Amino acid sequence: MSGLLALLDDVAAIAKVAAASVDDIATAAAKAGSKTAGVIIDDAAVTPKYVQGFAPARELPIIWRIARGSLINKLVLLMPATLLMAAFAPWLVWPLLILGGGYLCFEGAEKIVHAVMPHDEHTPGPDGSHDVGNPAQLEEQKIKGAIKTDFILSAEIMVISLSAIEAPTFWMQAVTLAVVAVLITMAVYGAVAVIVKMDDVGLWMNKNGVTGFTRRLGAGIVQFMPWLLKALMIIGTAAMLWVGGSIIVHSLHEMGWHLPYETIKHFAHDFGAGHGGVEWLLTAGADFILGLAVGLVLIPIVVKVLIPLFGGNKSAAH
């Protein structure tokens, strides 16, 4: 009997350690995930455009394939590389974050310039999809383009998450990063699936609603969805510039150049009058302006130098 009690005591102790580890992983994952909020918003805002123009029956299959590609990006390609970098070359984290932040700034600024400057709506997109007449081929091109874009955003998510994870062991760090990758992917593409199907739900309610209120609500959803998609694109662009600017400022701060970080911090504190919400808004606004400035500087460099250097064309910037 004493041996059984000792065994049960050992099992209970192991269970407590396991429960503590799970709790630590959940806490670390939540903290790391919160650091990537801006990139997640942009990811969720960008993705719906890849299913526009397809039959409703193809929307969810396309989203599933993009989500599956996103998981492969994060778990198979990026997570091992990120963990190896953290183990053997941790000094690379901040320069890579600056590169990723610069990319987000370029994308955000380029979207604004593309929206306000005259352009040809029939100019081929980065994946050449406007030139494709076959629906099946168009679908493949769209999915490839979405997964390619997701790879960049996923790389940002993984590196940002890794920089925020405070795990005592390599394996807990790896498990936490995997949890973050899976949960973020589920959240982003689950939200995208809901967004792209809401107009179908509204149409069904409008045609099949039992009451007048239900039918009117369905019609309202159908009318509201185009506005929501436009708002998401605006929010996504703003998030790109805000997050990009913030990543650059904080990474430079971690690398030893404190001037941008301290300047924004003191500006927000002085004008925020000690109100946390106001200080956050001022900080986010300053990061946004900095991100826009960096993006505008990068546009001619990318379009005139980098794209021709790597064999691209000007339309690839769009």
Image: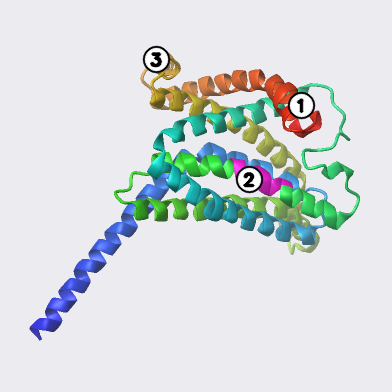
Q: Amino acid at mark 1?
A: His
In the figure, is residue 224 to the left or right of 15? right
How far apart are the alpha carbons under marks 3 and 1?
A: 34 Å
- Residue lying farthest to the left in this orientation: 2
**Residue name at image x 66 percent, y 38 percent:** 232
* Residue 217 visible in the snapshot: no
- Please determine whether, in this image, residue 316 is positioned above or below residue 74: above
* Label 3 residue SS: helix
- Please determine whether, in this image, residue 12 is positioned above or below residue 229: below
According to the image, label 1 marks what residue?
A: 114
* Residue 93 visible in the snapshot: yes
Q: Mark 1 or 2 closer to N-term?
A: 1
* Label 2 residue SS: helix
**Residue name at image x 87 percent, y 29 percent:** 120
Residue numbers of the magenta segment: 145-152
According to the image, label 2 marks what residue?
A: 150
Q: Nearer the viewer, residue 164 or 83?
A: 83
According to the image, label 3 marks what residue?
A: 266
Q: Which mark is residue 269?
A: none
Q: Quadrant of residue 318?
A: top right
**Residue name at image x 55 percent, y 30 percent:** 99
- Please determine whether, in this image, residue 272 is positioned above or below residue 70: above
Q: Amino acid at mark 2?
A: Asp
Q: Residues within 10 Å of mark 3 (few under 14, many from 20)?
A: few
